[in-house]
Amino acid sequence: MAYIFPCTILMPLCGAFFICFLKNTRLIKIVGLINSIVTLFLSIILWIYFDNLLVYPQYMIQLNWSPIENFQPKLGIDGLSLFFIVLSTAIIPICFMASLSGIKKQIKEYFICFLILEALLILVFSSFDIFLFYVFFEGVLIPMFLIIGIWGSRERKIRAGYYFFLYTLVGSVLMLLSILWIYFKTGTTDLVVLYQIKFSEFEQILLWLAFFSSFAVKVPMIPFHIWLPEAHVESPTAGSLMLAGVLLKLGTYGFLRFSIPLFSLASIYFTPLIYTISLIGIIYGSLTTLRQIDLKKIIAYSSVAHMSFVTLGLFALNMQSLEGSIILMISHGIVSPALFLLVGILYDRYHTRLLYYYSGLVHIMPLFALFFVIFTMANISLPGTGSFIGEFLSLLGVYSNNNSVAIIATLGIILGAAYSLWLCNRIIFGILKSDYILYISDVNKREFALLIVLLLGTLWIGIYPNLFFSTLHTVVSYLLINVANF
């Protein structure tokens, strides 16, 4: 088992290196897909052999090659990072399957970018050194910038790529400065060691704000969300799947891994600020979704609202809210990519994402209509889906902390049902607009298989969440003990 974790990291990098020497397009697709499936299989093995009772990171790798004093970065997996690694490795083969017919140019570079992105995401979630985390955290921007800028679907793709890159990079400058300050003050960047160090209240406030400037952009929180709709609209379908499925979780993961345990006093101090921003995000994101006419923008703004539920639950700082937020992140990482995949199916056939041109698709695309209705129900947290478990526990935890905030947040559930059912009604039901829909093409076998996998994932979380809670209990309890001790 000692070699499984290094193999999980190296597998996508080896696949990208091997693809560099291939010229046959079909062979490139086969190698990339097989490589991503093997990486997923390795991550599942890590999950199977993971010990739920251990607090400290497992499968630890220590890098001793650094010439810098006291800088020996560590990689490992704990109960918090495990599910995000599995989610990352699961989304990549879905991205490849979704791209088999849609990507026509520079296919070799396309697969290389996604494999490098996968390796960087695994390294981000397994880093137990704050400087190493920062390097990989920002390294993710490069392949994603290329994916949006080269393989985007419209003329504004370069602008959207720069929006994504510059917003997220500039937001992280203060975080880098704070990491350097921590190193010169404590002499280490080892996260396990830093958990035992007490910073003064003033230091915590400044450091918390510096880390917040980076994580809030990645979530994204209001008003740092401007890059998200642009990036989603201009990126290819697989790019939207990665953005919604994994990249939006980097910010909330950062709050859980760094801001809350390292700067506990500051996290409590700034809880009213987070509550305010999150409530604005829930209501503003939902109302803005109602007035969009682009299908991708509708789902993008709904993601702003859902991720605001996550941040609301994270800073309630109790067991129910933290576990609910993590479950909601995982569920959103399945449901939102499924909706973007469905929008991509429409765009591949009819080459438009404007809502005006679609109506009555149930008459000609019954399978598509069925999946769209199911994932719409999952998006509004219908009982039996993972989103219901996550939102219910998040709101329950927030209610025990501040019932007025929880009551206001429930408006997001009502508004979420409004924009989701409004969108579903406009697309699926009504009279078919035969002037624009000139031919009939329902979901094919490949798309059907992808949607079934995503459907089983969200139902699995909704029906049997204990499999996830058994792993989360230990790490969340340890995190709350750290918060209480400081």
Image: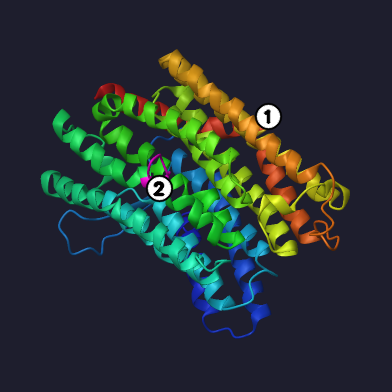
| Magenta residue span | 217-224
Residue 1 in the image, given as x and y percentages of width and height: 50, 53
Q: Quadrant location of residue 387?
A: top right
**Residue hosting label 1:** 382
Residue drawn at 42 percent across, 22 percent down: 318
Residue 22 is a magenta residue: no
- Would you place residue 120 above or below residue 13 in this image? above
Of the 4 image quadrants, the one containing the C terminus is top left
Q: Nearer the viewer, residue 341 or 350?
A: 350
Indicate left or right for 220 with 456 as reference.
left
Numbered label attached to residue 12: none
Q: Say which amino acid is labelled 1.
A: Leu
Q: CA distance from mark 2 to mark 1?
A: 27 Å
Describe the colour scheme in one phrase: rainbow
Tell me which residue sits at (53%, 53%) in the image: 88
Q: Amino acid at mark 2?
A: Lys
Left/right placement of residue 377 relative to residue 289 reads right
Lower position in the chain sequence, tag 2 or tag 1? 2
Query: Residue drawn at (33%, 52%), measured in percent from left and top?
Result: 133
Q: Position of residue 483 (x, y in %)?
A: 30, 26
Find disc 2 in the rendering and name its residue: 218
